Image (cartoon, rainbow, N blue to C red):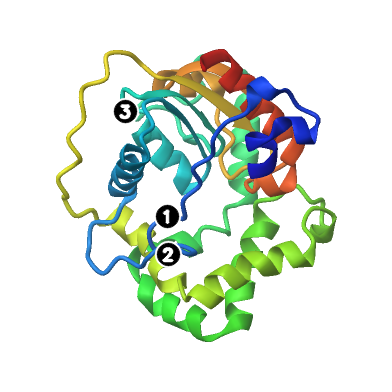
């Protein structure tokens, strides 16, 4: 996505849709450092990115994210410099204590239940990463076959491939993803984020001026995402100004359906920039 967003004219877009792109690896992932202390949860990662934006001198920015990036993006939205956020992988549940059927169509409820049933046998990874991350992590760090199996299983479960994974992702792309974990030895440090989120350590937040408004939010909902919530549920979480239900695609949207993803991100930021 970096090329089309930074230089849209070179990809058939309009110059006014161009952005600077700040695309950091999260702490513990890829080419970032590996935290050596407790407390590196999504809140602290967002604070680290805000320090980066300070040092780079940006007075206004938008944010986009999915997966853990969505949680971090929500935290970035608390900063008054943030003009808007665009997310995929939105929160997947109604508000706590609410009747999930209230105010939504039978089709929305059935779609939510169907996706939950499809993935019912696919959540063990989160349980072990959230409770015994290093027991798993060192094993994956020692076995390229095990690492590949662990990662590709998620591409299989969370993508819209109709039984043919090669139709959506080339082997070169998948191997590149695996190799970034392998050569940087970041599987142990990356899976720790699950433990940090389920066993939080209190870390003083970065001082921020209070935000006086609710940040505009755009949501792209892909049909094979892990969560398929109803729009009405998200209106309780977000100041929702754009909602797009995609015709195809899943969790790894930027890789799987880059044009759908790009068009929606562009459409949202035209509204808020």
- Which residue is drawn at the image coordinates 73% and 47% (left, top)? 256
Task: Indicate the quadrant where residue 32 lies.
Answer: bottom left
Instruction: Give the number of the disc on residue 17.
Output: none
Dot 2, how many residues are within 10 Å of its Cα: few (below 14), some (14-19), or many (20+)?
many
- Asked whether residue 57 appears in the rendered view, the answer is yes
Which is nearer the N-term, disc 3 or disc 2? Answer: 3
Which is nearer the N-term, disc 3 or disc 1? Answer: 1
Q: Is residue 242 above or below residue 246?
A: above
Task: Give coordinates of residue 202: x percent, y percent.
Answer: 16, 50
- The residue at which mark 3 appears reads as 78
- The residue at which mark 2 appears reads as 190
Please tell me whether mark 2 sits on a helix, a strand or a loop. helix
Dot 3, how many residues are within 10 Å of its Cα: few (below 14), some (14-19), or many (20+)?
some
- The residue at which mark 1 appears reads as 26
Q: Is residue 60 above or below residue 207?
A: above
- Asked whether residue 104 appears in the rendered view, the answer is no
- Which residue is drawn at the image coordinates 46% and 40% (left, top)? 70
Task: Give coordinates of residue 6: x percent, y percent.
Answer: 63, 36
Question: Do the residues under discs 2 and 1 have CB atoms within 8 angstroms?
Answer: yes
Label 2, label 1: how many angstroms apart (C-alpha)?
A: 9 Å
Report whether 166 appears left or right of 272.
right
Please tell me whether mark 1 sits on a helix, a strand or a loop. loop
Report whether 231 appears left or right of 132.
right
Report whether 61 appears left or right of 202.
right
Q: Nearer the viewer, residue 172 or 226?
A: 172
Dot 1, how many residues are within 10 Å of its Cα: few (below 14), some (14-19), or many (20+)?
many
């Amino acid at each position: 996505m970096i090329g089309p967003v930074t230089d849209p004219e070179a990809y058939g877009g309009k110059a006014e849709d161009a952005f600077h792109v700040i695309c950091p690896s999260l702490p513990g992932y890829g080419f970032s450092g590996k935290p050596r202390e407790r407390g590196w949860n999504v809140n602290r990662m967002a604070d680290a990115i805000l320090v980066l934006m300070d040092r780079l001198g940006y007075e206004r920015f938008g944010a986009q994210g999915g997966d853990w990036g969505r949680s971090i993006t929500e935290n970035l939205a608390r900063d008054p410099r943030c003009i808007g956020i665009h997310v995929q992988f939105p929160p997947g549940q109604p508000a706590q204590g609410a009747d999930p059927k209230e105010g939504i169509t039978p089709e929305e409820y059935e779609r939510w239940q169907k996706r939950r049933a499809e993935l019912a046998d696919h959540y063990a990874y989160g349980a072990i990463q959230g409770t015994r991350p290093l027991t798993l992590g060192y094993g994956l760090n020692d076995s390229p076959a095990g690492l590949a199996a662990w990662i590709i299983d998620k591409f299989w479960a969370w993508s819209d491939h109709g039984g043919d994974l090669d139709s959506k992702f080339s082997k070169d792309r998948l191997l590149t993803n695996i190799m970034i974990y392998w050569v940087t030895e970041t599987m142990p440090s990356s899976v720790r984020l699950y433990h940090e989120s389920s066993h939080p350590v209190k870390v003083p937040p970065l001082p921020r001026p209070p935000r006086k408004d609710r940040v505009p939010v755009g949501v792209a909902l892909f049909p094979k995402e892990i969560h398929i919530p109803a729009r009405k549920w998200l209106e309780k979480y977000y100041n929702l100004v754009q909602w797009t239900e995609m015709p195809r695609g899943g969790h790894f949207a930027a890789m799987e359906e880059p044009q759908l993803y790009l068009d929606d991100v562009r459409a949202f930021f035209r509204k808020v920039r």
